[in-house]
Structure formats: structure tokens, C-alpha cells
Image: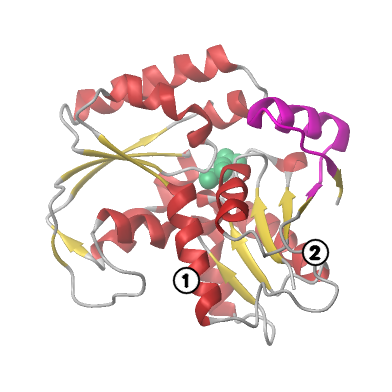
């Protein structure tokens, strides 16, 4: 059975690359909702509607387990979808928790009371919708006390990355980091809270300077998914007909154009088909 990966566009490919490398025996189906990206400037109701449609599309592809490789969808839609109840045998996971567990030095699924942690000043870079949801701060408050989070909504950045405009993307990263540093001059850690941002991680590192520990999601999500599949072997295993180690790429956008941009961004051939 394949595992579904969903993002508004190309950012989730950072997660796809990490999970496919970490779990070479597992088959994945990636769905990018490029026709509707970016999500980060949309109201929460819109994000919920689009995310639900994407997840249902992946369920129809036979992916009983779907990972929202998108913080904006995880922040605006995951809790509501889970609380409304998922169909029998279906699961949806987000990308927030592995990141927060790494930041708060917890093991996967450790639900003990919130405690003091070593980082106190954390910069969060995310889409306007993720920042507005305060989902990151809410999840953090369950696990850590005394952490000061300064959040920077990085308007325009996902668009620039999706368009492949590297110069604009780097300029925006510098501007957003400078804006954050005016409010928090010395962050100890920075969270890249959008799966598109690892595609411009060197620009973030350069603008933040060498003393800031940068937390980026892809590797953390891959470890968390490996652990989840160990505990839930009914998902993502090599059942009859499975073609372990491959990913099928689907898009709601124009497959030729999306394939070209994905290939440019990842510097390897990626071929999308129409969803
Ligand atoms: N990759 C998505 C995320 O992690 C980007 C959201 C968007 O489309 O604005 O939030």
C-alpha cells in the first residue's frame, strides 16, 4: 500500500526526497495542488476545503495513510479533519509534531508535562496562514515552558519559490530575517515552518548567521514516519503489487510546467502526471 504525501505545490518535495531516501522499500504517491497554490495567503476555510479534497484524492489512489507535507494545511486543516472523524482505516498525519519534538528534545510520542528546555528564543518562519493559526505555539505549549517564539509571516516567499525566481526568493529571505531580528535580535534557534523553505535554506542560514541552530523538517518527518510505519505496518508496506521505492507524482496544475519547475528545483528529473 502506498503512502500519500500532500502539499499545496512543490514544497512537499523536500519531504518526499527525505522519506523516499529513508524508506526505500515504501511506495509513495505525491499530490501537489499547484492549481491552487499558494495556500498560505488563503483563509482557513479555503485551506480546509482544498486539503480535504487533496486527501480524498490520495485515498482514492489507495493511500490509506496520508502525510500533509505542508505546514499550512497541517495548521489549518488537520485538527478539524481528525476531530470530524476519518473514514474507517484511514489516517492523516501532519508535519508539526516531529519538528516540535526535536526542538523540545523529546522522543516521538512523549506526552509528559511541559518542561523547561535549553532554547529560549525561537524564531519561526512560516506562511501568513500558519503564523495566524498560532498552531505552532499551541503545540509547543503542550511540551515546553518559558520559550519565547517570535513568528515572521514570510509573505511572497512560496510564490517566488514556486515561480523558480531565486533572486526574489533570496531577497525576500533577507528581508524577512531582518524584520524578525528587529523584534528578536538574538534567536538561538530558527524553525523553517514551511516545507518550501528548505529549498532556500542556504539563504536563511546566511541571513541568520552561524550562531542560530536551524531546524528544517524533511529529515525529522522522515524519521517520524519510519517510526510510525514500524508501529503500524499495515500502512506503507510492500503488499501484493507494490513497487517499493518509487514515487508517483500527481498535480492539479499543468503537468508539463510543474514537471519542469520541479526538475529545476530539485536538480533531478521529476515527471508529474495530471491528478
Ligand atoms: N509548503 C507549504 C507549507 O509548508 C506552503 C504553503 C503555501 O502554499 O503557501 O506551509
Across and down, in percent, residue 217 comes to 44, 48
Colour setting = secondary structure
- The image shows residue 59 at horizontal and vertical percentages of 76, 70
Residue at the image position 68 percent from the left and 39 percent from the top: 37
Write down the region rendered in magenta: 249-272
Q: Is residue 138 visible?
A: no
**Label 2: how many Cα within 10 Å (few below 14, some 14–19, many 20+):** some
Residue labelled with disc 2: 243
Residue 165 relative to residue 113: left or right: right
Residue that badge 1 annotates = 227
Q: 82 above or below 124? A: below
Q: Is residue 169 in the magenta section?
A: no
Out of 184 and 273, give the one closest to the viewer.
273
Cα–Cα span, label 2 and label 1? 21 Å
Please state the total of marks drawn on the protein image.
Answer: 2
Outermost residue to the bottom: 88
Q: Above or below — where is 241 with respect to 194? A: below
Image height of 102 relative to 82, above or below: above
Depth check, mark 2 against mark 1: the one in front is 2
Magenta region includes residue 270 = yes
As helix, strand or loop, the secondary structure at mark 2 comes to loop
Amino acid at each position: 500500500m502506498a503512502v500519500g504525501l500532500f502539499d499545496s505545490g512543490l514544497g512537499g518535495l523536500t519531504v518526499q526526497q527525505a522519506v523516499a531516501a529513508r524508506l526505500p522499500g515504501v511506495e509513495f504517491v505525491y499530490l501537489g495542488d499547484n492549481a491552487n497554490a499558494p495556500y498560505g495567503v488563503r483563509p482557513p476555510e479555503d485551506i480546509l476545503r482544498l486539503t480535504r479534497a487533496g486527501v480524498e484524492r490520495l485515498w482514492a489512489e489507495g493511500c490509506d495513510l496520508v502525510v500533509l507535507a505542508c505546514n499550512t494545511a497541517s495548521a489549518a486543516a488537520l485538527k478539524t479533519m481528525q476531530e470530524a472523524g476519518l473514514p474507517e482505516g484511514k489516517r492523516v498525519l501532519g508535519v508539526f509534531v516531529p519538528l516540535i519534538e526535536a526542538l523540545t528534545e523529546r522522543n516521538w510520542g512523549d506526552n509528559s508535562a511541559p518542561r523547561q528546555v535549553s532554547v529560549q528564543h525561537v524564531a519561526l518562519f512560516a506562511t501568513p496562514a500558519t503564523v495566524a493559526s498560532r498552531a505552532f505555539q499551541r503545540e509547543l505549549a503542550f511540551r515546553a515552558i518559558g520559550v519565547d517564539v517570535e513568528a515572521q509571516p514570510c509573505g511572497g516567499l512560496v510564490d517566488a519559490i514556486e515561480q523558480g525566481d531565486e533572486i526574489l526568493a533570496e531577497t525576500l529571505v533577507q528581508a524577512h530575517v531582518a524584520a524578525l531580528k528587529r523584534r528578536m535580535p538574538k534567536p538561538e534557534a530558527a524553525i523553517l515552518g514551511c516545507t518550501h523553505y528548505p529549498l532556500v535554506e542556504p539563504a536563511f542560514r546566511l541571513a541568520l548567521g552561524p550562531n542560530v541552530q536551524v531546524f528544517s523538517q524533511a529529515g525529522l518527518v522522515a524519521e517520524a514516519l519510519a517510526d510510525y510505519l514500524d508501529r503500524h505496518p499495515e500502512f506503507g508496506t510492500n503488499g501484493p503489487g507494490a513497487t517499493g521505492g518509487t514515487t508517483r507524482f500527481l498535480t492539479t496544475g499543468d503537468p508539463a510546467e510543474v514537471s519542469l519547475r520541479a526538475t529545476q528545483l530539485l536538480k533531478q528529473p521529476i515527471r508529474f502526471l495530471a491528478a
